[in-house]
Image (tube, helix red, strand yellow):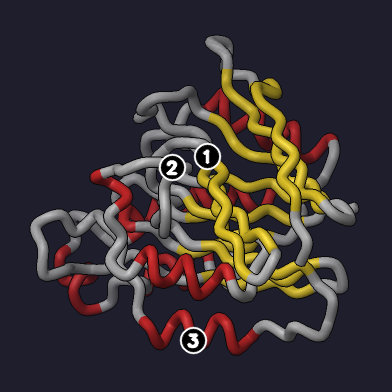
């Protein structure tokens, strides 16, 4: 059995400290095999915000895999945004957040969907590059028996039509990843969901997470996902925050898998 914690949209710089402390205590009391963080580590891509994120991940003492989100591009330092958009992310949290992790039980690869700018008004939305998808898929070895997981910030598909889920090349990327993966983990919407795509008799589950620490909630409280990989199923337990800033199990789903 493998146990993972999936968190997204931490938004350090606009975080609730009681929620940060609660999740740290939960992780330290019963360490997972890994943490998968799907973007928006910071509120505005400031150095101090990245320092907070790094300190949090260092305190967990477990492997952390993650990809940046649209809030991790510097918002106010426009020279950095356009010339070196990912420099702060890689320099300040890169030492503790890896783009991939491979064990005998599972193999996680990340995909960057955030962009410094786009040919549309809302730069916060996601966009996928074909070459990045090909590179991700090529790193998987279908013969090694590990459960294959992809992680990115922006949702590739959503339970229903969502304006904030309009990721360029999202649906076609979802179809491609469904041929290779059992799980695709995302963030951005501040919402928990699990949607399957079937390919050749196997399910690939696309799972979203709510914001972990931010007060910028939308339709559900702050929370995170616990994912347990079992022989034929994926057990997804969603934790929600209460008014006192503590996390509690709110919903459990058993997702069938055959790959």
Q: Quadrant of the C terminus?
A: bottom right
Q: What is the residue that sits farthest to the top in this orientation?
A: 243
Residue 94: % across, % down: 54, 69
Q: Does residue 216 appear to the left or right of 122 in the view shown? A: right
Label 3, label 1: how many angstroms apart (C-alpha)? Answer: 26 Å
The local secondary structure at tag 3 comes to: helix
Q: Residue at x 63, y 86 (%)?
A: 139
Q: Which residue is mark 3?
A: 134
The local secondary structure at tag 2 comes to: loop
The local secondary structure at tag 1 comes to: strand
Q: Are marks 1 and 2 in contact (CB under 8 Å)?
A: yes
Inspect this view and state whether residue 60 appears.
no
> Which callout, 1 or 2, points at the residue further toward the start of the chain?
2
Q: Quadrant of residue 64?
A: bottom right
Label 3, label 2: how many angstroms apart (C-alpha)? Answer: 25 Å
Q: Residue at x 32, y 53 (%)?
A: 71
Q: Nearer the viewer, residue 194 or 80?
A: 194
Q: Which residue is mark 2?
A: 159
Residue 235: % across, % down: 76, 42
């Amino acid at each position: 059995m493998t146990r993972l914690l999936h968190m997204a949209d931490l938004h350090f710089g606009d975080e609730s400290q009681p929620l940060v402390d609660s999740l740290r205590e939960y992780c330290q009391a019963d360490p997972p095999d890994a943490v998968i963080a799907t973007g928006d580590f910071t509120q505005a891509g400031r150095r101090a915000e990245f320092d907070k994120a790094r300190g949090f991940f260092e305190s967990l003492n477990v492997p952390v895999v993650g990809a940046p989100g649209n809030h991790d591009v510097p918002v106010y330092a426009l020279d950095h945004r356009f010339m070196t958009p990912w420099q702060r992310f890689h320099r300040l949290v890169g030492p503790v957040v890896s783009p991939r992790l491979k064990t005998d039980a599972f193999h996680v690869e990340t995909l960057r969907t955030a962009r410094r700018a786009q040919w549309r008004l809302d730069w916060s939305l996601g966009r996928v590059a074909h070459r990045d998808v090909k590179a991700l898929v090529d790193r998987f070895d279908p013969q090694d028996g590990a459960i294959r997981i992809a992680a990115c910030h922006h949702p590739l598909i959503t339970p229903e039509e969502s304006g904030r889920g309009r990721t360029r090349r999202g649906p076609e990327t979802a179809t491609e990843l469904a041929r290779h993966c059992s799980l695709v983990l995302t963030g951005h919407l501040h919402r928990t969901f699990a949607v399957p795509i079937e390919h050749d008799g196997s399910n690939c589950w696309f799972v979203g997470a709510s914001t972990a620490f931010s007060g910028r909630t939308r339709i559900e409280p702050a929370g995170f996902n616990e994912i347990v990989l079992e022989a034929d199923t994926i057990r997804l337990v969603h934790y929600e925050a209460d008014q006192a800033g503590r996390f509690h199990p709110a919903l459990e789903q058993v997702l069938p898998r055959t790959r």
